Amino acid sequence: MVKLDILSDPICPWCWIGKAGLDAAMAEQPDHPFTVEWHPFQLNPDMPREGLDRRTYLEAKFGGREGAARAYAPVVERAAEAGLDLHLDRIATTPNTLDAHRLIHWAGIEGRQTAAVSALFKAYFTDGRDIGDRDVLADIADAIEMDASVVRRLLSSDADLDGIRQRDAHSREMGVTGVPTFIVAQQHAVPGAQSKEMWLKVIEDIRAQIAAG
């Protein structure tokens, strides 16, 4: 098996699109060599705990409404190509994702990490839910068969807050400036939302290397 580490943020649309490309390749090649682990990277590490109004955030980030529309046009196009059910109009708040990353971490301990990531993307991009809200996160945990009462109690504590921040900071120190970033076999960094075809080629190359000894 080959370790595939993925640095991602559940409010990053390109991370969702990149996951779709990888998922499609792994579905087409179910005997793929990858063991996947997700790692935290906050797009907005200084986001207020309660988040920000999404329109205000986007217009400030992209220089007005037209700039935001231009920035998201390729997102909408690629999401449609990937068959993703994207509803940007339903998103009212851009959240702080620190707690969402804690949930992903705890889900990993229970072997449900990818399920958590998938559920967070759907909650945010399809359903327009505030994934910075702890009740929403507990509900997501329940939906993937985690104990929601335990998750709610952990979220109300400081459990793993420093660990998530340190892992995020470590990635930045290693030179990661954006997500998604995929790291193959702890050696090769693959940045950006790659296509199914690219991942099929990577799988083919890995198999060839293994066969060659």
Image: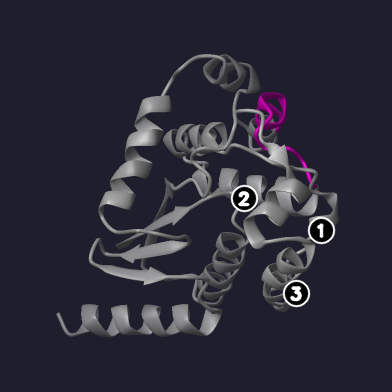
Vertical placement of residue 168 versus 181, above or below: above
Q: Secondary structure at mark 3?
A: helix
Label 1 environment density (alpha carbons within 10 Å; few <14, some 14–19, many ≥20)? some
The disc, 2 or 3, on the residue closer to the chain's N-terminal end is 2
**Residue 167, percent across and down?**
34, 40
Residue at figure coordinates x 78%, y 68% from the top left: 66
Quadrant occupied by the C terminus: bottom left
Q: What's the CA distance linking mark 3 and mark 1?
A: 11 Å
Range of the magenta residues? 128-139
Q: Nearer the viewer, residue 76 or 23?
A: 76
Q: Secondary structure at mark 2?
A: loop
Tag 1–tag 2 contact (CB < 8 Å): no
Dot 3 corresponds to which residue? 80
Residue at figure coordinates x 56%, y 72% from the top left: 21
**Residue 202, percent across and down?**
38, 80
The disc, 1 or 2, on the residue closer to the chain's N-terminal end is 2
Q: Nearer the viewer, residue 10 or 175?
A: 175
Dot 2 corresponds to which residue? 11
* Residue 126 image-quadrant placement: bottom right
* Residue 141 image-quadrant placement: top right
Q: What's the CA distance linking mark 1 and mark 2?
A: 13 Å
Residue furthest right as drawn: 89
Q: Amino acid at mark 2?
A: Ile
**Residue 175, percent across and down?**
29, 59
Q: What's the CA distance linking mark 2 and mark 3?
A: 17 Å
The answer to whether residue 135 is magenta is yes
